[in-house]
Image: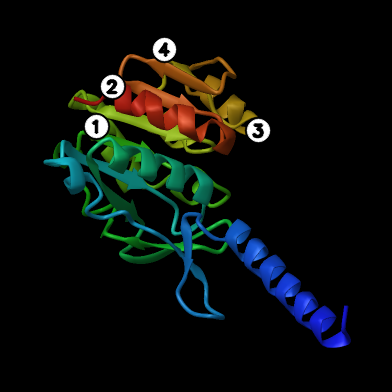
Amino acid sequence: MSTKVKSLLFILLAVALSLAVLSCRGGGSLKATDEEGPARVETGEGAAGEEGAVKGKVLLAIAQRGFQDIEYDAVRKALTAAGYEVVTASLQRGKATGTSGAFVDVDLSLAEAVAADYAAVVFIGGEGTPSLYGDADAHRLAREAAERGKVLAAICLAPVILARAGLLDGKRATVYPSASRELTEGGATYTGVGVEIDGRLVTGNGPESAGQFAQAIIELLP
């Protein structure tokens, strides 16, 4: 085999390997906004309309900084695939940044959100969740959802928000293990399972349970 042929084969092999690596990194929920900038979680707007009318709206409440991307993305994708429109709320409109550095567009602030407008209110966890533990609007929104018989859900550290809002007294619930004491102090029976369902209340213990958590919410929705 000539030197030129060997060189050509080497170049083709290098290109093939590069394409393989890129395909492994791509195809996920994150999209680069530019070559050097942060990634953006796809909103999935319009996905529900592809198969018919939107069944309803679901509010996902997240921390402005440090929400759990995996949980948010898994729940959003499952809901849009099931025909629901997803609206994202945080402390303020604009951008919210996830634990991996990805960001999402925040549609409205928690102060603007009204539970009556949604079929479910879902609090996503993440390392930034403690910023919502004592937030009056997060508590109000959760209480409104419970009072109106909406599906109310929280995952990872977010069940602490419900506990501090006084909504877990006498309820079975789960949470990220490090926050279990918050639930018991709020009157809940901490079960420690991946996903717990008590009536129209759904709680999850972390990102590894996000898929099951999303499915439990969907099964309770109209």
Q: Is residue 200 left or right of residue 12?
A: left
Marks 4/2: CA–CA distance: 20 Å
Q: Position of residue 108 (x, y in %)?
A: 25, 58
In terms of secondary structure, where does tag 2 sit?
helix
Please name which of the two marks, 2 or 1, marks the residue nearer to the observer. 2
Residue matched to label 1 = 145
Q: Position of residue 43 (x, y in %)?
A: 33, 56
Residue matched to label 3 = 178
Q: Quadrant of residue 59?
A: top left
Front residue of this view, candidates 150 and 10: 10
**Lower sequence index among marks 2 and 1:** 1
Front residue of this view, candidates 4 and 61: 4
Which quadrant of the figure contains the N terminus?
A: bottom right
Numbered badge on residue 220: 2
Please name which of the two marks, 3 or 2, marks the residue nearer to the observer. 2
When the figure is inspected, residue 184 is found, relative to residue 23, above or below; the finding is above
Q: Amino acid at mark 1?
A: Ala
In terms of secondary structure, where does tag 4 sit?
loop
